[in-house]
Amino acid sequence: MQEKIVPLIRAIKTKEPAVAMAALNVLRQIGGVADAEFVALDLLPVLWSMSLGPLLDLQQFQAFQDLIKSLSSRVESEQTKKLQVCHTHFLVFEYWIFPSI
């Protein structure tokens, strides 16, 4: 579902704040269920682009920034955990193959 909705939001041409804020609410919902890779590669670029809309006021811009920071933090946390697990598995594998090292 998210793979169909995000391209539609990305294709929105209007810079109208009401439209941007409605899109923000949809993207917030998608961000809550999407995996970290989708968030990083598909959602965050759309959010950044929309957050720079020339007609947004400060409060609207900050709403975008809050979601961007929250999703970025989640991506960072999940990627860190993934790399730690991979590193741990590598060390166990290395010890198993080369126990004397």
Image (cartoon, grey):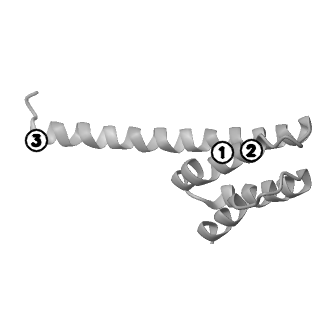
Q: Locate residue 99 relative to residue 42 in the image: left or right.
A: left
Hey, what amino acid is under mark 1? Leu
Hey, what amino acid is under mark 3? Ile
Q: Quadrant of residue 13?
A: bottom right
Sequence-first disc among 3 and 2: 2
Q: Position of residue 96 (x, y in %)?
A: 14, 41
- Name the residue: 84% across, 39% down: 61
Q: Locate residue 40 relative to residue 55 in the image: left or right.
A: left
Hey, what amino acid is under mark 2? Leu
Q: Nearer the viewer, residue 2 or 11?
A: 11
Disc 2 to disc 1, C-alpha distance = 6 Å
Q: Nearer the viewer, residue 22 or 99?
A: 22
Q: Quadrant of residue 73?
A: top right
* Circle 3 SS class: helix
Sequence-first disc among 3 and 1: 1
Q: Position of residue 15 (x, y in %)?
A: 84, 51
Residue 24 in the image: above or below residue 77: below
Q: Position of residue 38 (x, y in %)?
A: 55, 55
- Name the residue: 17% across, 38% down: 94
Residue contact between numbered discs 2 and 1, judged by CB atoms under 8 Å: yes
- Residue 97: which disc? 3
Mark 2: few, some, or many residues within 10 Å (few <14, many ≥20)?
A: some
Residue contact between numbered discs 3 and 2, judged by CB atoms under 8 Å: no
- Residue 67: which disc? 2
Q: Locate residue 67 relative to residue 7 in the image: left or right.
A: right
Q: Nearer the viewer, residue 83 or 72?
A: 72
Q: Position of residue 8 (x, y in %)?
A: 69, 66
Residue identified by numbered label 1: 71
